[in-house]
Amino acid sequence: MICATLPFAGLCQRTVRAGGAVLALGGTGPAWGFTPSGATGAWPAVALIGIATAVVAGVWLRRVQGSVRQLQTQLQQARAEAHGLGDALDVWQWRTDAQHRLTHLRPPPGVPAVVWSSGQEPAPLLWQHFQVGDEHLQTLRTAAQNCAPLPLTPVWQTSPTGHKRQLLLRGSALLDTEGQFAGHLGTARDEAHAADAALSELLRDLPMPMLRVRPALAEQPVSLQESNPAVAAWLGLNEGQRNRL
């Protein structure tokens, strides 16, 4: 508002207001001044809006921080579980990149990694580290190049010391965060252990009582290795008593 003061016949003054300007015309000449219009009511409203915005932003930030901490805790737990599972597996664990080169190789517990490290640079292809017979090589390579799961494949592994070990290899395809092929993750089980596990599974499924004994070795006598559930039913034993046989 503009306010103006005008002299009238030298005896009085008139004040004119328009917007936020004040004009005073008097004995010493005109004088201008500006005052904000509606300032008394506007500034408290702006302050309240700023306070409310800060409160909402603080609550949102606290919730985001809580979610981040929860995700970090879950990630740590998942890593710990994966590490513990890796320690418990009695198989070779391996991983390849998108070019099928071996990037990770972990031996079973009790086998020093240095004994089986190839030491090759660059990293060997999967079927170069795990040797494959001609009758299975093409099938394995085709599955790998098609980014498909790798079927159970008999392979062998030769250590730097010349020791040869027969293994059964299998793997699953990995995808990155964008859904692109990122390699394979898999295991290679000792054939002797695999055959032993298959025999134990067959023994458990037989309906007749069966005992598996361990032959005498050195000064150790013949001992019972395992028995199937039918033995417990035949002898009238519960599961706990059968496990103590």
Image (cartoon, rainbow, N blue to C red):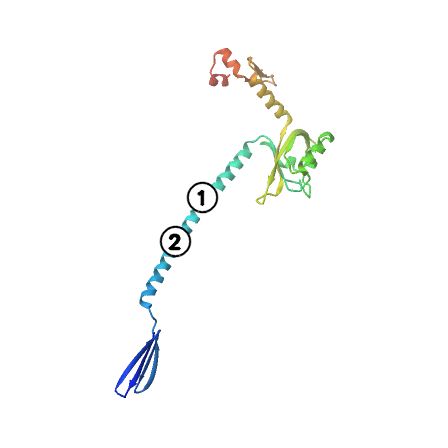
Find numbered disc 2 in the image and state the secondary structure of the residue it sits on.
helix
Above or below, 130 relative to 14: above
Lateral position of residue 176 relative to residue 232, left or right: right
Lateral position of residue 137 relative to residue 67, left or right: right
Please name the amino acid that badge 1 sits on.
Gln
Say which residue appears at 44% left-offset and 49% top-offset: 64
Say which residue appears at 47% left-offset and 41% top-offset: 74
Find numbered disc 1 in the image and state the secondary structure of the residue it sits on.
helix
Q: Identify residue for label 1.
A: 70
Q: Identify residue for label 2.
A: 56
Above or below, 96 relative to 10: above
* Mark 2, other Cα within 10 Å: few <14 / some 14–19 / many ≥20: few
Q: Nearer the viewer, mark 2 or mark 1?
A: 2
Residue that extends furthest to the bottom in the rendered view of this protein: 10
Lateral position of residue 89 relative to residue 121, left or right: left
Residue that extends furthest to the front in the rendered view of this protein: 9
Please name the amino acid that badge 2 sits on.
Val
